[in-house]
Image (cartoon, rainbow, N blue to C red):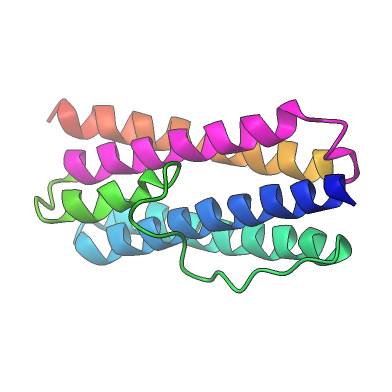
Amino acid sequence: MENNQEIISDLKGLVSIINDGKEGYQSAAESTDNVELKAVFLKYVAERALYENELKSHLAKHGGHSENEEGGILGAIHRTWIDIKEALTDQSETAVLGAVVTGEKAALEKYDMAIKDNELHSDHLDLLTTQRNGIAEALKEIEVLEQKYKDR
């Protein structure tokens, strides 16, 4: 029973950081007139919504649920997507992309912590690994874009 509560807690944490990312990407998309960046950001809004639904499905299998639809609160340690809102006051491409990089790195850390406990998360380890790899791919794409706009 204690293990199940830990699983539920971990999955709720992942739902929160995924929703922080979804919210961050949405804010980024709304803040830019750059068509290329807007398309990339909206692609990841949709991907994060899918990840959220997958996590909530596994959460339900363990008797838990999450009403979280919008990410975490400002003071949450692993929820650095809030930085994106601060970057939006600048609205430069590099500032927004830099904030997205920070958020994605925080998400990877959260996933790595859950995946590290592979015995606890054995029934959904493939899902967590797939989502983590998707976040890593997004991070690579964002870092390439960030470098592209820095070099301009």
Furthest-front residue in this view: 2
Seen at 63% across and 30% down, the residue is 112
Q: Is residue 57 left or right of residue 14?
A: right
Furthest-left residue in this view: 90
The quarter holding residue 41 reads bottom left
Q: How many marks?
A: 0
Pick the residue in front: 146 or 53: 53
Span shown in magenta: 94-123
Q: Is residue 108 left or right of residue 59?
A: left
Seen at 63% across and 61% down, the residue is 52
Residue 137 sits above or below residue 84 on the image: above
Q: Quadrant of the C terminus?
A: top left
Residue 10: give x, y in percent of width and height.
68, 47
Residue 70: give x, y in percent of width and height.
46, 68
Residue 122: give x, y in percent of width and height.
89, 38
Seen at 33% across and 56% down, the residue is 74
Q: Residue 109 colored magenta?
A: yes
Pick the residue in front: 16 or 132: 16
Residue 108 sits above or below residue 76 on the image: above
